[in-house]
């Protein structure tokens, strides 16, 4: 009966298993179905895109690129950047150790897989699941696709899938050797270098074939992360990476253990080669500006967003670091070839403007401490209609001075900032040129004027004509919304200080980081277009020859900054500066409608003048590279240069004698202006410009804010509950991570894995404001974790040092014991031999000298082991000695004596001397004979001497103790 029950239960269990398996299968099928339903369309499109993209790939896409060529406005070639053609290296000419070493380090299964290595992918997934360190699963082919073909560094499923499809198709089109050649010649190596040949030349000033194994290992380690393993910026990290690469080389049999141990001890040995090939554009200001603009446009085409407004200085610093990295990469891409750049450069005009500026400064031949001409100059000329930079001067000469100050010369603009910071915004708020203002004490500390005291009540026009600081400060301070700062952001001032957003001192030019003449000229130029800003540039287009597409075309897009009324009133008021104010010296002799503003900084360390006609705007700066006070004549150079440039440009452009265009809403009566927009029906264009643009801008801002906080719903179609659930998971994971702080090094991998898990969870968060907030927390946690690891490593190093000291002490103790044992062993021999010596001398044995030497040897050996034995003196009686003439005699009463002595100097040498005679002993010396009866003479001394007519038998021996 019991047996039947057991059989019945067993049958029931067996019947359950199929249902359990079926349920599991159904769940898997449903999960796959749900995934496919949600992502299937995107996956199919991505795969199709990958196949479509790969079909057009050809060898010429990788080797070689045509040089980047820059043309002037008339289509004439002005520069060919020739880096790529001289850097591409065929596979047969590539250092074999690079070929093998790269595969050993980056993709050991390169010759086995077909573009995608499933083993590596599974290994990578497994390492993450098992809480080990993250390992890459991409093959060299995939890296080639990502960095060279797609040029996409984003981390998402769509990009990864497309990359895998193209990689597999690439393996079908090309051999492994071709793919390796493409990779070695195209991989980004930092500092604008693409490929190993370019990197070898840049970092070591050597050909890649001549690199030693340690330098080769440095290069092999860079592609993994060119920024993190930058040999110039991070030498310590680079050395660690190099040594790891060398270890892999050794493990893979590429180098011997001896070479490995030697190579890892070497320094980096960098020898930076800044001037590579004929790519120097620093000797042409217009050309260097074109390359600067082209680089920034390449950055934008790769997804980089230019920013001019920042939350704080930390935000600005972080952006600056990203900008530098992106700029360097894009610049290297440009130099690597494959682009056609068309510019608006007119070299005849450029050369003439440079000539005019240099003639203005020709009498100033002094030089600063760095050998550069002083004072210096920068000048930017803009075509008001297009916004193009038609001429640019970055200094007085390019000989020994490659700085283009019109691009990078950030200096204080002084009072030239007043129109854009104080007056134009004031006109927008309702002020008129004839409005009354008061010059009086204001500010803490008090704002000084360039003259002593205050003049009291005056007009806006008079205040600008005479550059009254207090009035400008008051007008800026009244702008409670700080629109002046927003206006400068719109006009792309690159180095605005976020801490000065509400600082009215900007009206006097107190910019923390300064401005450039290009920024000032483009800002003033906006007034001539009714307040519309155009990004300054001297480019027309950039064409990507490899992909057959334009990546940039200059459409001269306009951006509203000031109103038409305010812009005209600003121009009209600045005309008074030139006709009646401080800018009289800048008035053009061949054109009367000129507007402008002077600017001088504290102690006259900088002099500025920005002037304009309806056709062009010129911004000039002069000063010393190391700020110092200018003389009165030097201060006037900016206006003199403007006058020379302006008069030439009026003739060159054949400018008609017409005033700045006045809006229909402004009425001019003498020096008074008024706005009659309420009485006059605005034109359709005015309605579009003044109303629709404002409405459209407001709506765009609202939509941007809405998108910023509701993107999870609009773009990703998530409910509020779904999105907040994802955010809650991230927050809980962070809280859990913080519950158990790291207290020992063995926790590091686990904590690192936990951080990675938090990152994955945050990747699912779609609300950007929340994602950014979590990213900041994760970054801080990562910094703290890295700091903890560094502390653990330091503790480990201290422990190693302590262990070494302990082992050293133990070895010293053991060595001392061994030495003492040897001394103990030798002492019986010493005592025995001492007795033999005494006996030999006592009996006057024939071997007494040999016995004495044996004693000396034993004594020396004892002392060599650190032992201590005393000097020995043996005496059996007393003796007297007398010397006379050539004979000597010694007598002893009833005794026969033998004496032996041993002396030691410093414990390292010993000597023994003796002579012995029994009964009678006679010897001859120098033809003399001496007879002794029953006498013995013995002497021992460190200094030996002879006495005439004496007989002295002596023997000496010495030994050095070598421990």
Image: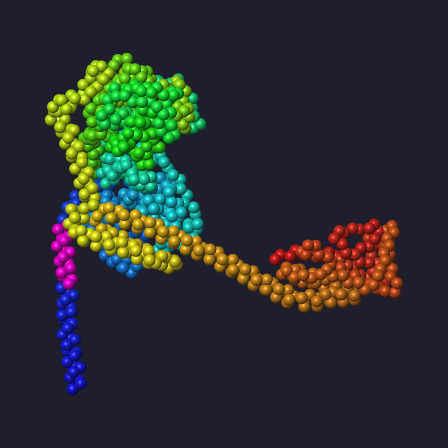
In the picture provided, is 228 more to the left or to the right than 179? right
Instruction: Name the residue located 29 percent from the left edge and 22 percent from the top edge.
Output: 437
Q: Is residue 125 visible?
A: yes
* Residue 245 % position (x, y): 36, 51
Instruction: Name the residue located 76 percent from the left edge and 52 percent from the top edge.
Output: 944
In the picture provided, is 695 more to the left or to the right than 585? left
Quarter of the image where the C terminus is located: bottom right
In the image, residue 473 lies in the stretch drawn in magenta? no
> Of helix, strand and loop, which mostly describes the magenta segment?
helix
Count of labels in the image: 0
In the picture provided, is 456 more to the left or to the right than 894? left
Please state which of residues 47 and 154 is positioned toward the viewer in this rendering. Answer: 154
In the image, residue 31 lies in the stretch drawn in magenta? yes
* Residue 132 % position (x, y): 31, 58
Residue range of the region highlighted in magenta in the rendering = 27-43
Which residue is outermost to the bottom? 1
Instruction: Name the residue located 13 percent from the left edge and 28 percent from the top edge.
Output: 687
Instruction: Name the residue located 17 percent from the left edge and 78 percent from the top edge.
Output: 10
Q: Indicate whether 235 appears above or below 1.
A: above
Q: Is residue 534 visible?
A: no
Please state which of residues 478 and 379 is positioned toward the viewer in this rendering. Answer: 478
Which residue is outermost to the top? 589
* Residue 192 % position (x, y): 31, 39
* Residue 623 % position (x, y): 38, 24
Quarter of the image where the N terminus is located: bottom left
Name the image colouring: rainbow
């Amino acid at each position: 009966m019991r047996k039947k029950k057991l059989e019945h239960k067993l049958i029931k269990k067996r019947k359950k298993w199929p249902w359990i398996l079926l349920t599991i299968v159904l769940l898997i099928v449903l999960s796959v179905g749900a995934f496919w339903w949600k992502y299937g369309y995107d996956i199919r499109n991505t795969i199709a895109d990958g196949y479509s993209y790969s079909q057009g790939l050809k060898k010429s896409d990788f080797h070689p690129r045509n040089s980047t060529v820059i043309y002037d406005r008339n289509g004439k070639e002005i520069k060919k950047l020739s880096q790529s053609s001289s850097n591409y290296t065929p596979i047969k000419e590539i250092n074999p150790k690079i070929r093998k070493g790269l595969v050993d380090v980056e993709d050991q299964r390169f010759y086995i897989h077909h573009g995608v290595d499933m083993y590596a992918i599974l290994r990578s997934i497994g390492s993450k699941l098992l809480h080990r360190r993250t390992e890459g699963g991409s093959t060299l082919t995939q890296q080639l696709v990502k960095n060279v073909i797609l040029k996409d560094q984003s981390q998402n499923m769509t990009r990864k899938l497309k990359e895998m499809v193209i990689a597999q198709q690439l393996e079908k089109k090309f051999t492994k050797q071709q793919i390796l050649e493409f990779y070695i010649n195209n991989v980004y190596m930092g500092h604008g270098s693409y490929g190993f040949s370019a990197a070898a030349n840049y970092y070591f000033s050597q050909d890649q074939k001549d690199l030693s194994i340690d330098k080769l290992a440095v290069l092999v380690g860079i592609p993994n992360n060119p920024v993190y393993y930058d040999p110039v910026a991070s030498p310590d990290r680079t050395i660690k990476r190099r040594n790891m690469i060398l270890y892999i080389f050794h493990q893979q049999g590429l180098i011997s253990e001896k070479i490995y141990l030697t190579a890892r001890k070497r320094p980096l040995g960098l020898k930076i080669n800044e001037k590579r090939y004929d790519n120097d554009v620093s000797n042409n200001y217009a050309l260097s500006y074109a390359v600067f603009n082209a680089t920034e446009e390449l950055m934008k085409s790769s997804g980089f967003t230019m920013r001019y407004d920042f939350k704080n200085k930390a935000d600005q610093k972080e952006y600056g670091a990203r900008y530098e990295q992106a700029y360097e990469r894009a610049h290297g891409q440009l130099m690597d070839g494959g682009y056609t750049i068309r510019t608006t450069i007119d070299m005849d005009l450029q050369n003439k403007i440079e000539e005019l500026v240099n003639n203005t400064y020709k009498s100033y031949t002094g030089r600063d401490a760095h050998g550069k001409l002083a004072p210096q100059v920068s000048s930017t000329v803009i075509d008001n209609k297009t916004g193009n930079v038609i001429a640019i001067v970055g200094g007085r000469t390019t000989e020994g001075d490659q700085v283009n100050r019109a691009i990078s010369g950030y200096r204080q603009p002084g009072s030239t900032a007043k129109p854009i910071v104080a007056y134009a915004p004031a006109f927008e708020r309702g002020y008129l040129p004839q409005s009354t203002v008061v010059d009086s004490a204001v500010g803490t500390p008090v704002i000084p004027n360039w003259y002593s005291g205050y003049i009291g009540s005056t007009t806006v026009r008079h205040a600008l004509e005479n550059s009254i600081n207090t009035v400008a400060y008051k007008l800026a301070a009244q702008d409670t919304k700080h629109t002046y700062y927003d206006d400068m952001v719109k006009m792309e001032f690159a180095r605005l200080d976020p801490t000065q957003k509400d600082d009215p001192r900007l009206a006097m030019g107190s910019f923390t980081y300064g401005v450039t003449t290009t920024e000032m000229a483009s800002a003033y130029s906006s007034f001539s277009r009714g307040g519309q800003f155009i990004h300054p540039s001297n480019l027309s287009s950039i064409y990507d020859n490899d992909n057959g597409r334009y990546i940039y075309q200059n459409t001269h897009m306009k951006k509203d900054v000031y109103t038409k009324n305010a812009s005209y009133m600003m121009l009209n008021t600045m005309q008074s500066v030139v006709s009646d104010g401080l800018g009289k010296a800048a008035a053009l002799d061949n054109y009367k409608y000129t507007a402008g503003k002077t600017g001088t900084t504290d102690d006259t360390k900088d002099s500025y003048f920005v002037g304009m006609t309806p056709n062009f705007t010129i911004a000039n700066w002069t000063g010393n590279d190391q700020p110092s006070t200018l003389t009165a004549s030097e201060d006037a150079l900016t206006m003199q240069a403007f006058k020379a440039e302006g008069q030439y440009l009026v003739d060159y452009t054949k400018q008609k004698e017409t005033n700045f265009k006045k809006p229909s809403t402004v009425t001019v009566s003498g020096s008074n202006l008024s706005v009659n927009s309420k009485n006059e029906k605005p034109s359709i264009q005015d309605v579009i410009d003044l109303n629709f643009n404002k409405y459209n801008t407001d709506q765009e801002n609202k939509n941007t804010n809405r998108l910023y906080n509701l993107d999870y719903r609009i773009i990703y179609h998530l409910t509020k509950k779904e999105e907040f659930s994802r955010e809650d998971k991230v927050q809980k994971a962070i809280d859990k991570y913080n519950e158990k702080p790291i207290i020992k090094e063995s926790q590091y991998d686990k904590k690192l894995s936990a951080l990675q898990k938090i990152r994955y969870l945050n990747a699912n968060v779609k609300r950007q404001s929340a994602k950014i907030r979590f990213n900041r927390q994760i970054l801080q946690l990562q910094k703290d974790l890295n700091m903890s690891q560094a502390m653990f490593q330091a503790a480990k190093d201290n422990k190693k040092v302590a262990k070494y000291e302990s082992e050293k002490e133990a070895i010293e103790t053991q060595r001392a014991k061994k030495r003492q044992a040897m001394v103990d062993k030798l002492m019986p021999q010493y005592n025995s031999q001492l007795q033999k010596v005494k006996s030999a001398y006592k009996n006057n044995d024939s071997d007494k000298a040999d016995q004495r030497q044996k004693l000396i040897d034993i004594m020396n050996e004892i002392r060599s082991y650190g032992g201590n034995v005393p000097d020995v003196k043996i005496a059996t009686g007393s003796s007297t000695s007398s010397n006379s003439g050539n004979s000597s005699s010694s007598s002893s009463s009833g005794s026969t004596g033998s004496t032996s002595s041993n002396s030691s100097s410093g414990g390292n040498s010993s000597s023994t001397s003796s002579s012995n005679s029994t009964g009678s002993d006679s010897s001859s010396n120098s033809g003399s004979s001496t007879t002794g009866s029953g006498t013995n003479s013995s002497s021992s001394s460190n200094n030996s001497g002879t006495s005439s007519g004496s007989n002295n038998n002596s023997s000496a021996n010495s030994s050095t103790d070598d421990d």
